[in-house]
Image: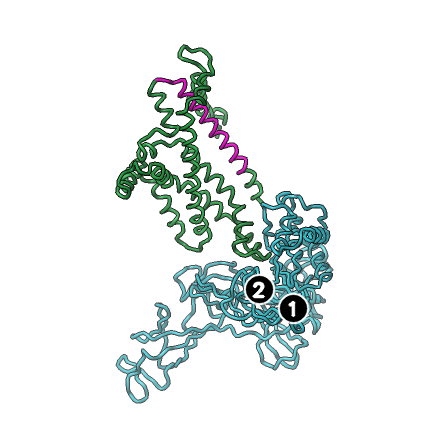
Amino acid sequence: MAEKAENIIELKHITKVYSDNGFKAVDDFNLEVKRGEFVTFLGPSGCGKTTTLRMIAGFELPSSGEILLDGRDIAHLPANKRPINTVFQRYALFPHMNIYENIAFGLKLKKLPKEEIRKKVKHVLAMVDLEGFEDRKIATLSGGQQQRIAIARALVNEPEILMLDEPLGALDLKMRKEMQLELKNMHDQLGITFIYVTHDQEEALTMSDKIVVLSEGKIQQIGTPEDIYNEPKNAFVADFIGESNIFKGIMTGHMKVRFCGGEFTGMDDVPEGTLVDVVVRPEDVIITAPQDGTVAGVVTSVIFKGMHYEVAVESGKYEIIIRTTKCYAVGDEVGICLEPDGIHVMLAEDHTTSFVTTINSDYTLDFNGKVIRCDLTKVVPKSKMKDNALIDENGETVDISKLKVQVSIQPDDIEMSDEAEAGLVSGEIINLIYKGDHYSYVVRTEYGYDLIVDDEYLWNMNDKVSLVMPEDKMKFQLKK
Amino acid sequence: MKNVFSRRQMGIPYGVFLAFFVAAPLIVLFYYAFTNGSGQFTLNNLKNFFVDPNTMGTLCYSIVLAVTVTLVCLVIAYPVAYILAGSALKRKGVILMLFVLPMWINFTLRITALKEILSLIEGNLAFHPFLNTVIGMTYDFLPFMILPLYTTLSRLDSSLIEAAGDLGADSFQTFIKVIFPLSIPGIVSGVSMVFLPAMTNYVVLDMLYNSTYIMGSLIGSYFSAYDWHNGSMIALILLFIIGIVAVVSEGNDTENTGRGLV
């Protein structure tokens, strides 16, 4: 083989659609992993991180795309032919074998001499601090010990890549912290590539060289832990990584941004007039006397958290969470200001919902059997109604069967209802982010599409909601 | 509200039941097995069992028959259970039920029907008596082998199979080294559910063989000839054999489930 490429593994346009229900678990995933890197896939459950890991390990085949290992496409190679070993979420140790047999499993298949196997097992057991455990049965081990055996069983095969699927999820907090450090040390000593899957942002920040933040099958951001924490690319990443206040804002001048009822100076140069999302970390907010702050507010709650207090301040209709070492009392009037480097500005994404409808014979719009009333004379150019028929500028009846109308509506114009039949579509809340004065919800509709709804009231995850879209808030556009 | 009956009091009817219908008959069985016609203690009945070529022949025949039926059931049932347990079919419950469904039809009716079919094919049942009996019993006991195997295999943690693949095993090696050893509890309970009834079931043999070459019918023939003492001894020895088989498989079973609880 020629000189080994710098990237040990590359994923190119990997997409995974489950054939039985059409669910798109991973959508156009692109990633390069350098040799010896510690890469973490981070995201909430159902974001596609485990599916991606399973495709790299070979337990699942991608629907499309390439997985290049040292430049060779292995996307359709079975798992047992890949130089990759996995530490499973629930360890997956063989219950009918003792520890020696478990660890030696892979080596015996490679037909290594017995003496060599014995030596390697001994060595790897020493590495995980379980010397002399060869003859113990799996059932006699604690969760943490099983975890170590699972790691030993994978490492003894000297894989080029070690995959870890939420390996610490079942351990208690203290054990988890210890194992985090041990895994990090092992990674540094062995120099092999680790791909780690977790939903725990703190774990990801502690251990990784590179974090891949995933949501709903799509990569949200790839970067170092510092990048991800300090410069989140969008509101999802900011909300998922650490605690944060997220506000809607607008750029009002050079590095000036208005949000939360005040004008602040930031560090991000975005053109004036741009709509933005602003992220403020709770530890970056400075509490001052009421008259000294950029905005003023009233303390509404104080929670002691050991290292600090978590103070909620209400300013107008906005709520700001602040982390401070000083104690305040509920009802205190305070001022709030921010250093420029404490303000992270992200371009607001366009969350307009739009869908295409056909025209019924009575000139209403049809959306999957639901009727939307619309003044078609304003949609079809130069048309008017005459004798209950839509005619064009030449006086001829418009052939509406060929026309389609695109309807669009803003997130804050959609209302949510818990009556199933109340709205145009129904769906389930799959994500929510608090944005200072309202919540931003991601609703997965019955047709499988995700749309964004802004609502000032709090709904719960997994709530079934019906989406009411007032016709006077809709925008209609002819679609050819 | 006050609890009228204690747990102990509620157990009384069951205790009475056990005393009258389990303990008492066993005592009577022991009494007859070790006495002679005039009510005196004797070991002659035990001796008769091993000396009489008829009883020993029947015992050996029963064992050979039961082992054959058990093996045939296992060979047929394992692939069925394995395929069903691993399939992503939504309707696999229905397929499984189709295998179990014959159990809901009257037993005599089923065997009579089978007898007619076999007569049609073979002309005369007397040509292949052993084969016919094996077919009849397999047909009858197959669900008892499929169900425990299916349960064990479908509970098998799929990540163990993935782990074997991950460590370099191909699908054959995965089966030999992981799936089969972990399905042994299912095999043991399937075997004990087929082997024991196959030892003693005489309806199938009676209808497909017209013979009393099985333990159950042998005991029946002693009792109908009013030789209760030898009949009781055979029943007792059979109980002993079944007890040994049950204890052995039980021990194997608990050991494996114990390991399986990880």
Q: CA distance from mark 2 to mark 1?
A: 24 Å
Badge 2 amino acid: Ile
Q: Which residues are magenta?
A: B226-253
Chain that appears cyan: A
Q: Is residue A238 visible?
A: yes
Q: Is residue B130 magenta?
A: no
Residue B124 relative to residue B176: left or right? left
- The mark tally for this picture is 2
Q: Which residue is mark 1?
A: A228
Q: In the rendered image of this protein, does residue A396 appear above or below residue A298? A: below
Q: In the rendered image of this protein, does residue B207 appear above or below residue B157? A: above
Counting other residues with Cα less than 10 Å from the Cα at mark 1, is it few (<14), some (14-19), or many (20 or more)? many
Badge 1 amino acid: Ile
Q: Determine whether the residue tagged by mark 2 lies in a helix, strand or loop.
A: helix
Which numbered dot is residue A177? Answer: none
Rendered image quadrant of residue A168: bottom right
Counting other residues with Cα less than 10 Å from the Cα at mark 2, is it few (<14), some (14-19), or many (20 or more)? many
Q: Where residue B134 sits in the image (x, y, percent)?
A: 37, 39
Chain that appears green: B
- Pick whichever of labels 2 and 1 is earlier in the sequence: 2
The residue shown at (54%, 69%) is A14
Name, please, the residue furthest toward the bottom.
Answer: A394
Q: Determine whether the residue tagged by mark 1 lies in a helix, strand or loop.
A: helix
Q: Which residue is mark 2?
A: A56
Q: Quadrant of the C terminus of chain A?
A: bottom left
Q: Where residue A12 sits in the image (x, y, percent)?
A: 56, 72
Q: In the rendered image of this protein, does residue A387 appear above or below residue A43? A: below
Q: Where residue A337 sits in the image (x, y, percent)?
A: 69, 70
